Amino acid sequence: MPRKKEETSATDLDFESALGELGQIVDALENESLTLSDMIARYERGSLLLGSCDAFLQSARQRLEKLVIREENENVLASGGKLCQPPPPAQPEIDPDDDTISLF
């Protein structure tokens, strides 16, 4: 597969495009007969794409954590400032007519 003369910067791609291109690179490295220099160039491009995908996922995780914290704070404020209590631990149902012995 011929290489494009002008590649889009890894940071300019959206997550799905970067992940798709990374998949194509992996397929090419695994299945195509490439020259060593082409393999190295694709590996370098894949490394950049992987870093871009990782940065996007870290950013998304931080954004979601902030949303969860914001929601928890809003719930506390809505309950009059009382901290929400965790539910009590689950208790196993005990059948008084059960004569079996179980360690767990």
Image (cartoon, rainbow, N blue to C red):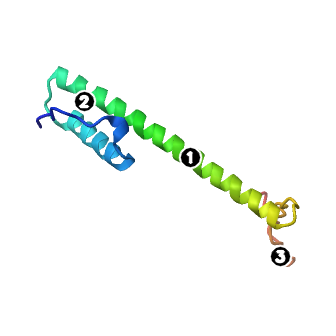
Q: Name the element at disc 2.
A: helix
Reply above or below: 57 against 37: below
Q: Residue at x 49, y 44 (%)?
A: 57
Can the viewer see residue 77 in this picture? Answer: yes
* Mark 1, residue position: 61
Is 14 in front, or is 85?
14
C-alpha separation, residue under disc 1 versus residue under disc 3: 44 Å
- Give the number of the mark in front: 2 or 1: 1
Q: CA distance from mark 2 to mark 1?
A: 28 Å
SS for callout 1: helix
Nearest to the observer: residue 33 or residue 38: 38
Judge the density around disc 1: few (<14), some (14-19), many (≥20) Cα neighbours within 10 Å.
few
Q: Is residue 80 left or right of residue 37?
A: right
Farthest residue toward the bottom?
97
- Residue 4, position in %: x, y? 15, 35
Q: Please report contact status of discs 1 and 3: CB closer than 8 Å, yes or no.
A: no
Instruction: Say what amino acid the circle numbered 2 marks.
Output: Arg
Dot 2 or dot 3: first in sequence order is 2
Establish if 7 lies above or below 57.
above
Is 94 left, or right, of 49 in this rendering?
Answer: right
Q: Which residue is mark 2?
A: 42
**Which residue appears at 21% of the width and 26% of the height?**
39
Farthest residue, direction top? 37
